[in-house]
Image: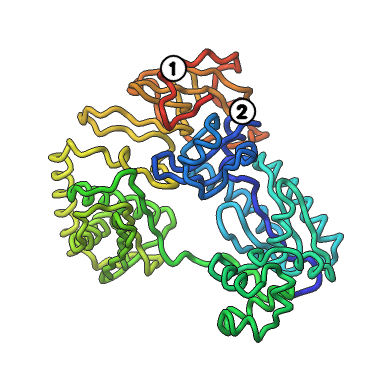
Amino acid sequence: MRGAPTILHLDMDAFYASAEQAAKPSLRGKPVIVGGLGPRGVVATASYEARVFGVHSAMAMAQARRLCPNAAYLTPRFSLYRQVSDQVMGLLRALSPLVEPLSLDEAFVDLEAGGTEPRVAVARAVAERLRADIRAVTGLTGSVGLAGSKMLAKIASEQAKPDGLTVIEPGTERELLDPMPVRTLPGVGPATAEALRRVGIHTVAETREAGEAELVRLLGRAHGASLYLMASGRDERPVVAERDAKSISVEDTFDVDVTDRTRVQLEVARLADRCVRRLREAGRSGRTVVIKVRRYDFSTLTRSETLRGPTDDPGVVREAAARLIDGVDTTAGVRLLGVGVSGLADYTQEDLFAQAAQAAEAAQAAEAAQAAHGAVEDPERGSGAEVPEPEGPGAPEAAEGSGRPRVWLPGVDVRHAEYGEGWVQGSGVGRVTVRFEVPWSGPGRVRTFAVDDPELEPGEPLPLVRSPESAEPPESAEPPDPPEPAEPAEHPAGTLSR
């Protein structure tokens, strides 16, 4: 562990919920909960206004609704979050070549590797400037911790929340760590904490005082020795620049266990197509196709097939996934399905014509089966991923001639030919309620349309901060007139309520 606090940990504050509040002026200062909206959904992020009611990440959405029934419940918009994350990571990389992203909203930075002088005052000034830059570029806030190691920097950023900066100066590490619960240390989960509790170890100080030999006896050599170093304030882990992903995958958890075999096959085909889209967006190809099946009893299995070479052909991946699911008994019910591709490469082997031809035949058969099975519930509508990732910028269109209405999820972007940009506030009983506002407007007006209104279409997320060089404001919401009273039918279960 180096002495100077030049390891920086950034954690964006309630990232998804804060981004939604920034994008939707009418939700600022109000409880916002983002996550899966189905019966088995979980909370991805809750705004600080919702947290005072006891709502937190990974909580069952049904429990969140009981604790905070008047919150805005929104489906995630990952395209927006990725845009904002790219802006934030760009600011971090301007500080140092050593940036280690942990997620869209969290990263470590080695400031010294970027030339920052290893002095407390200098590192603090860099961190303060970073926080100001993040607010200016994204309109959001982040909490920053500075310390001499990754472990301490992360602890410092937790103490800084929300929208703060905490610096752990050399020589103060033990004073800070000693009274903290042992769960504060990296690698201490419920099982390790329980093993330590049984022998009377509850705090970091008690962990260190137990000694390395006792911790090794209790937890094994690797885990025990590592934990002793952490409890002593020593963390030698370096900041590692972003590594290439080893695999790309998607999965969905269903509101109701799926037993229909044709439905399972259709879901796997849909997931395979989603996976390939992500693969192509990343500019990659892969040679191993993997499926994941979680059954009704929570038992989980995976099956994989390695192709002759890397591919990003949706037909090839779809065919491989279909072969794999054919070998799995799903008649008792499936809770979750996933499709992934591993063995990633930056190129596609060209000698895959035979596979591609077979895949084309399989795709035609799958399309025919889907058309013949029109009575099957729309997979896009019926699947409720615990933290769903919408496939496009807005609501999906129903298949032409299917007779099924379009689906509008709460929170997604829409655009109306007359009223401009807005977002779905709620839908049901054949109607959709839209609030027309943009990030730089005041609270917008609410209007209700038929779900199949031809003038209403999916929209693209707008930037959270208006570009200063934009001379003309984009076509957007109506002026922020007082909202019209909402009609009762606009807010069935699962949508925004006020």
Q: Nearer the viewer, residue 348 or 180?
A: 180
| Residue 472 placement (x, y as % from top left) | 61, 25
Residue 228 can be seen, yes or no: yes
Residue 18 can be seen, yes or no: no
| Residue 305 placement (x, y as % from top left) | 26, 68
Quadrant assignment for the N terminus: bottom right
Q: Nearer the viewer, residue 387 or 95?
A: 387
Quadrant assignment for the C terminus: top right
Q: Nearer the viewer, residue 227 or 76?
A: 227
Which picture quadrant has residue 197? Answer: bottom right
The residue carrying mark 2 is 25
Residue at figure coordinates x 68%, y 63% from the top left: 109
Left or right, 454 with reference to 435: left
Left or right, 132 with reference to 415: right
Q: Kindly state the secondary structure of the residue where label 1 is placed.
A: helix
The local crowd at label 1, few if under 14, some if 14 to 19, many if 20 or more residues have their Cα within 10 Å, is few
Residue at figure coordinates x 24%, y 52% from the top left: 333
Residue at figure coordinates x 35%, y 31% from the top left: 407
Left or right, 225 with reference to 403: right
For residue 157, above or below residue 302:
above
Which tag is nearer the camera, tag 2 or tag 1?
A: 1
| Residue 252 placement (x, y as % from top left) | 36, 50
For residue 494, above or below residue 136:
above
Residue at figure coordinates x 14%, y 45% from the top left: 369
| Residue 220 placement (x, y as % from top left) | 56, 82
The local crowd at label 2, few if under 14, some if 14 to 19, many if 20 or more residues have their Cα within 10 Å, is some
Q: Is the C-beta separation of discs 2 and 1 under 8 Å?
A: no
Q: Amino acid at mark 1?
A: Pro
Mark 2–mark 1 Cα distance, whole angstroms, equals 23 Å
Q: Amino acid at mark 2?
A: Pro
The residue carrying mark 1 is 488
